[in-house]
Amino acid sequence: MSGKQKAKSEETQRRVLEAAVSAVETGGLEAVNIRKIAADAGYSVGSVYKHYEDQDALLLGVNSVTLGRIKLVMAEAIVGIDEPLAQLKMLAQTYLDFARQNERLWTTLFAHRLPEGKKVPEWQIQENIALLAFIAAPLKQLHPDLTDETLAARTRTCFAAVHGLVTISLEDRFIGLAGKPLDREMEFLVERLAG
């Protein structure tokens, strides 16, 4: 493939993915329809399938964009914060704020399931692990005696607890919280988890 063809192919892939991200932002997971995405991007359905083998592959791309955005805001949020507990609190609040401001993208990240027998690609697993590293680093500072195995488990536990509070609250479950009480209880939760 020549340089010009490669650039054109990359541009097509980028525009298709942008159209899919936009569809999720406005309509959620259910809004991802290959025919509509192709039309919105200005390409044929065949062009979409040339870059994304199916709707699941396209949604993996959308979720990768979401993970990248979360990673960016988390990295920016802890710039200049040296104290590990303060980092953890800021990371949790940033995660909550991202979910509030990007609810459809965030929901799609966790609602999309690959069909049985289809494995999550290694690159997406690595993107998730990269996000967990934000939590692991300050936890290791707070508890330097943790083994790698225990640190990995504790990191996942902390994420699961924060994610659970965010999920229940954003889904407007009767036990969920909102506004300032949610922010306050998020801080309480992180303090207990990190303790």
Image (spheres, rainbow, N blue to C red):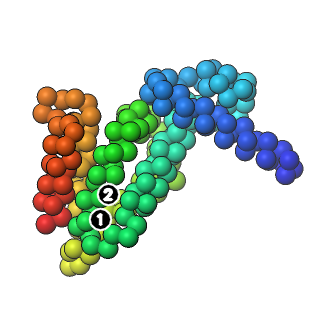
Q: Nearer the viewer, residue 125 or 186?
A: 186
| Residue type indicated by callout 2 | Leu
Q: What residue is shown at x 35% (from left), y 41% (from top)?
A: 99
Quadrant of the snapshot with the C terminus:
bottom left
> What residue does disc 2 label?
91
Residues at marks 2 and 1 touching, judged by CB atoms closer than 8 Å? yes
Rounded to the nearest angstrom, the CA distance separating label 2 from label 1 is: 6 Å
Q: Is residue 53 left or right of residue 186?
A: right
- Residue 155 visible (yes or no): no
**Other-residue count near label 2 (Cα within 10 Å), few / some / many at <14 / 14–19 / ≥20:** many
Q: What residue is shown at x 16% (from left), y 49% (from top)?
A: 184
As drawn, the residue found furthest toward the front would be 180
Q: What residue is shown at x 37% (from left), y 45% (from top)?
A: 98
Give how far across and how far down residue 165 sits, in percent. Answer: 21, 43
As drawn, the residue found furthest toward the bottom would be 145
Element carrying mark 1 = helix
Q: Nearer the viewer, residue 28 or 157?
A: 28
Q: What residue is shown at x 15% (from left), y 48% (from top)?
A: 185
| Residue type indicated by callout 1 | Gln
Q: Is residue 92 above or below residue 81?
A: above
Give how far across and how far down residue 18 sits, in percent. Answer: 60, 36
Element carrying mark 2 = helix
**Hey, which quadrant is residue 61 in on the image?**
top right
Give how far across and how far down residue 57 sits, in percent. Answer: 55, 37
> What residue does disc 1 label?
87
